[in-house]
Image: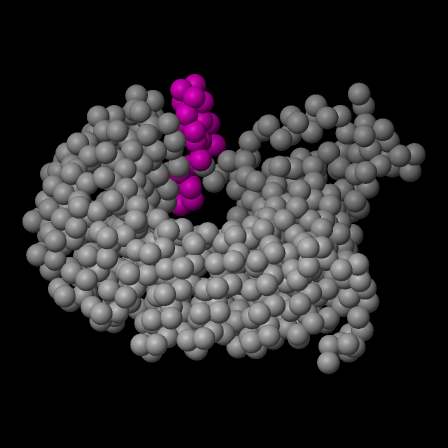
Amino acid sequence: MDPVKNKNTSGTDLNKIKKIVMDVIFNKIHTLCSPSEDWNAVHRIHQYSIPQSLVCSWKSRHLDHLYKRIISSPFDRISAAQWTAFFAGIKYSEITSLHLHRKNFGSLTDVQRKAFCEGIKASGITSLGLSGNKLNTLRPNKWAAFCLAVSQSKITSLNLSHNQLNKLRPLQWVVFCLAVKKSKITSLNLSHDELNTLKPKQWRVFYLALSKSKITSLHLSYNQLNTLRPNQWLAFWVGIKVSRITSLALSGNKLNTLRPNQWLAFCLGVGNSGITSLDLGCNNFFTLTPDQWMAFWLGIENSGIKSLNLSGNLLGILKPNQWAAFWMGVKESNITSLDLSGNHLNALPSLQWMAFWLEVKESEITSLNLSGNKLGTLQPNQWTAFLAKIKASEITSLNLSGNMLGTLRPHQWTAFWAGVKVSGITSLDLSANNLNFNVAFGLQWTAFWKEVKESKITSLDLSHNELGTLTDAQWAYFKNGLADSKVVSLTIKGGNKLTDKRIQALESILHNNKKEFVQSETRLTSLESSIAHTIFRGGCDNQSEPGYLQEVLPENLQGYAEISAEGRGLG
């Protein structure tokens, strides 16, 4: 069936519509930021009846290129018509995730903001990121309009970090909480929002909102929560306990500076919180005394926490007595997933390194993240201890990304695989290790895939390893090795610069063998305006930069959008 043409629209306009819709589906929408008549063509898409089969064929095709910067223009340079066209295109695509960081949302005009909000409501977007957009500068009526749009959308994941939401006026905070309660949001990110300065009444509103919301994952990292008083900590954990939250992120809050009574309140709260996943990365826990470690682990032991993130805490410089207290707690807890990335573990003396793996062996840990620890620089006896103990552990998932493993010598790789093959490891992350193995004829890739084949590995991550630099001969060895392995899930994201031909070759291999290929340079469902991919946490972010009150929203929430710019009624 041919598309129905509007009598005032030429065939050329229809071709533009087809082209732009196809571009949106292919994520080639960066050009939509440049003023052109193409915008108007897309804006009139609703005037045509595009055959469903044609739309589906556009969706099924793959990207020719990945445009990493989808929107390069500041928000205020995008007209209302352009926003409408933008979301019209998204509606016809498979895009469900939209991240527009540091775009100064507060600078939009009323017409632009309305078009944006209407687009959010009408699109199929389920994940929205607006970090660093100066949302705290929105006037009350504009803030209410934004919150209303969120509450009426399909959004389940909202990132409002780096927006200084502590500066919202009291009524604006209430409106925000009401909207979150009414919404479908299950993951909320309020990191870097200086929430430590919220007044007690605002905290109470927030806790009550959490208890009525659908939120299961809450990110409150880098909010200087170390300044909370003991009674505030107790109230905080009560608020968490009565909510549905199972995953909580409190990284970068300088919790190591808590006074004894604060620390005790914190640890008691953890034990009664009901959460199963806790992120305490970048809190300088290397300064904790053995007694503080014991109190901490007592709280963990009494909780239902299975996953613990202690990345970026410089645990590699712990003294023997601190290390002993640490592992005593790990073994007594129910933790099965432990993140120790970016902890300078390569700095551990040989005896402590051997003790480390002995403790891992005796724990219940099945998933261990050691990324960003420079393990490629380990001494031979340390490397031997690592491989000897890992094969006797319960570990099935091991993350070794960003560990300079590309510098390992052949005999070290032989020893590495000897340990992995007799272990229970089925998931291995070797991303960002410079594994391009750039030697003649690709013989090392032959050896690599031979070892993978003889192991139990079914999931392998080789992202950010410059695989695009492989010669044709090396690539042939790579493909053949993959096809002959047990790997059913291969991840190659970013930093590889693979050609279309090589991407298609991998897809063909994995498709024919009913395997999964996760490749960021193919068709995407996520749009980001700025790229800041973190492969592993090698350090901590100590600078502010860029996861209610009633059962239903009050009928007059619509009226909040009419509050005057002067903030009438905020008192």
Residue 152 in sight in this render? yes
Front-lying residue, 400 or 151: 151
Image quarter where the N terminus lies is top right
- Of 159 and 359, nearer the camera is 359
Q: Is residue 392 left or right of residue 74?
A: left
Give the image location of residue 422, x and y in percent: 17, 32
Depth check: 370 or 227 in front?
Answer: 227
* Snapshot quadrant of residue 18: top right
From the top left corner, tell me how far across and down residue 369 is, in percent. 30, 49
Q: Is residue 254 above or below residue 333?
A: below
In the displayed structure, would residue 334 be above or below residue 114?
A: above
Q: Is residue 406 above or below residue 324?
A: above
User: In the image, residue 71 lies at what x, y percent?
Assistant: 61, 53
Residue 129: image x %, image y %?
A: 57, 55
The residue at 25%/44% (across/down) is 364
Examine the structure image and report whether residue 493 is included in the region drawn in magenta.
Answer: yes
Q: Between residues 369 and 467, which one lies in front from this camera angle? A: 369
Q: Residue at x 53, y 48 (%)?
A: 68
